[in-house]
Image (cartoon, rainbow, N blue to C red):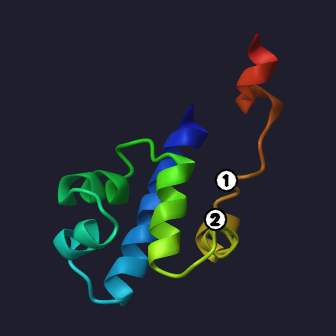
Amino acid sequence: MQTNKKLSQSIGKRIKLMRTKKGISQDDFGYFVNTDRTYINKIENGTCNLTICKLYSICEKINITLYDFFNDELFKNNNLFDFKESDNEMDNR
């Protein structure tokens, strides 16, 4: 479960970084990606579970691929994709 929270926070941090680099407010960004500003805030703070479809839509609007989104030092340095057996929910059935 800790991995999920860490991943959500890292995704939010990456989205915020890309948004602020472009000088776009949360309000304008929400409008641009067809989402409410409060939802953008929750995404950026890592307090909601963003669907892969919504992330894809956000990436598409800002002209970045999902590969490039995740191919970033933010994700590489946090070892977010080095899953241990105990982190795999399928093993806990």
x, y percent for residue 28: 20, 75
- Residue located 79% across and 37% down the image: 84
- Residue located 35% across and 89% down the image: 22
Residue at mark 2: 75
> Which sits in the foreground, 33 or 48?
33
Rendered image quadrant of residue 48 = top left
> Which sits in the foreground, 68 or 45?
68
The numbered mark, 1 or 2, whose residue comes first in the sequence reads: 2
Up the image or down, 39 lies above or below 89; here it is below
Up the image or down, 5 lies above or below 33; here it is above
Mark 1 touching mark 2, by CB under 8 A? yes
In-image side of 87 versus 19 (left or right): right
Three-letter code, disc 2: Phe
Question: Is there any visible trace of residue 10 in the rendered image?
Answer: no
Location of the C terminus (image quadrant) = top right
Up the image or down, 43 lies above or below 25; here it is above
Three-letter code, disc 1: Leu
Q: Tell me the CA gap for discs 1 and 2.
A: 6 Å
Location of the N terminus (image quadrant) = top right
x, y percent for residue 41: 25, 58
Residue at mark 1: 80
> Which sits in the foreground, 76 or 59?
59
Rendered image quadrant of residue 76 = bottom right
Residue count near mark 1 (Cα–Cα under 10 Å), binned few <14, some 14–19, many ≥20: some
